[in-house]
Amino acid sequence: MSSVCLVERLKKGGYRITPQRQEIINCFGSGGKHYSAEEIHQEIKNKFPNVSLDTVYRNLNTMRELGIIEALNFEDGKCRYELAGENSHHHHLICIRCGMSEELDFCPLKFLDSSLLRDKKFTVERHSFELYGYCSSCTGSKREVK
């Protein structure tokens, strides 16, 4: 989703595009990184030194409520955000040492037998699947620590 589309969705939601809000949008336009609010705050403080972390959180919450971004829980105590609809449905590999995350290009749950769910009288609306381990950079340092 382009930054122009993100701006339009905010405007349709009745929100003005402040310079700070535009800068938050620009963070998401720079690639498929999963940003925490703190990382976004650090990034935009270069241009807007007086912007507060609360402002970043409020804007992220607004964008999440409008369906522009999604909140991700990588179980490290920090919520991370990515553009909604980016690469559509996907899952993640997450390094438990450095926090690096990488998207899986397939859904392992699509192979789930739908008759199994029918038998349980259960309709799946959404799901999450993350694999936690060590990235190639941290695998060597993991061995050194032992």
Image: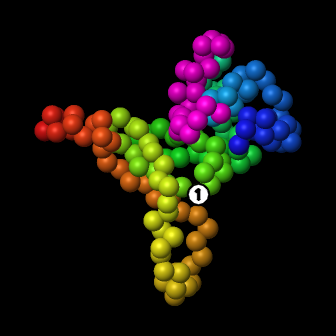
Q: Is residue 65 visible?
A: no
Q: Is residue 63 visible?
A: yes
The quadrant the C terminus occupies is top left
Q: How is the image coloured?
A: rainbow
Residue at 65% of width from left, 13% of height from top? 47
Residue at 38% of width from left, 54% of height from top? 131
Residue marked by disc 1: 89
The quadrant the N terminus occupies is top right
* 38 versus 101 height, above or below: above
The image position of residue 37, as x and y in percent, is 56, 31
The image position of residue 145, as x and y in percent, is 16, 34
Residue at 58% of width from left, 27% of height from top? 40
**Which range of residues does the magenta coloring cover?**
29-50
112 in magenta: no
Q: Quadrant of residue 5?
A: top right
* 28 versus 72 height, above or below: above
* Tally of marks: 1
Crowding at dot 1, Cα within 10 Å, few <14 / some 14-19 / many 20+, comes out as: some
* 70 versus 88 height, above or below: above
The image position of residue 74, as x and y in percent, is 45, 46
The image position of residue 88, as x and y in percent, is 62, 55
Left or right, residue 32 beside residue 62:
left
Residue at 55% of width from left, 85% of height from top? 118
Q: Amino acid at mark 1?
A: His
31 in magenta: yes
Left or right, residue 25 beside residue 146:
right
Residue 88 vs residue 73, the one in the foreground: 88
